[in-house]
Image (cartoon, rainbow, N blue to C red):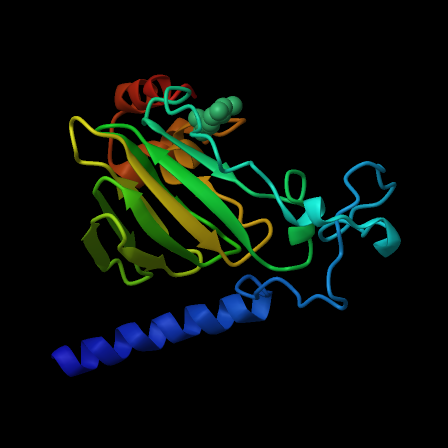
Amino acid sequence: MPTKRFFHQSFSTNVIIIFLLGLGLVKPDPDPLQDYCIANTKTRQPYSFNGLPCIDPELVLASHFSTPALSKPGNTRANPFGFNVTLTNIQNLPGINTQGLSMARVDIEANGLVPPHSHPRASEVTICLKGQIIVGFVTTSNHMYTQQLRSGESFVFPKGLIHFLYNMDQMKPALAISGLSSQNPGAQIVSLATFASTPGMPDEVLQRAFQITRPEVAKIRKNLGG
Ligand SMILES: *[C@@H]1O[C@H](CO)[C@@H](O)[C@H](O)[C@H]1NC(C)=O
């Protein structure tokens, strides 16, 4: 009965969304209460704070709104996947504090992958600037949406959903730039979160979750440096 099944699926999806809304997990960053709030990155605060307090507005310079952070490629050899993400944050661009956004430079070497991951606090829109990449995300109903992006083409990853970017070209590196709807989007790489956490998840949990044997758990852990 397709109609009934559809109703059932969308009903349970709505319940999950309402539940997450209730928990406050899908709220955007709060709106600023002033034009800007240049992050005071120098003074250590004796208390925990959502974002950082502002410096004296009299001391604000144009340079607080500017950064060369994304001008150079990150090192794609520092991990086994062949990618690097360089992000603007309140340290290298104190002017984004309270603005609810950030920007990322995504370098992917030939045949490199930004492995399936999610940003718990941000939606993301990415534009491919160089090369060709395959991007995709999976919904909470396990449906995958995927596209091939050529230079100049953009794609949206909805908030919190697991997504990937893959450079299938065997010869040329790819470059993408992403805008994210949080000053601190956060990132969880699925394979590392499950197989390389500290302390590690119990072997039994991974065996059951992935339907694999104990030696297979050990092998994947080793491959991922867990
Ligand atoms: C990205 O590159 C920087 C240096 O450019 C390096 O410190 C960092 O570990 C790299 N990140 C990843 C995820 O490989």
Compare residues 17 and 128 and report the one nearer the observer.
128
In the image, residue 126 sits, relative to residue 28, either above or below, namely: above
Residue 117 against residue 84 in the figure, above or below = below
Query: Which residue is at 76% across, 68% downward?
Result: 33
Q: Name the residue located 64 percent from the left edge and 52 percent from the top edge.
A: 96
Q: Quadrant of the C terminus?
A: top left
* 16 left or right of 38 in image: left
Which picture quadrant has residue 115?
top left
Between 149 and 67, the residue placed more toward the observer is: 67
Horizontal arrangement in the rendering, residue 145 relative to residue 100 (left or right): left
The reply to whether residue 208 is visible in this rendering is no
Residue 114 place in picture, x, y as percent: 33, 37
Q: Nearer the viewer, residue 31 or 220?
A: 31
Q: Is residue 204 visible?
A: yes
Instruction: Say whether residue 45 is left or right of residue 180.
Output: right
- List the single residue furthest toward the left: 1
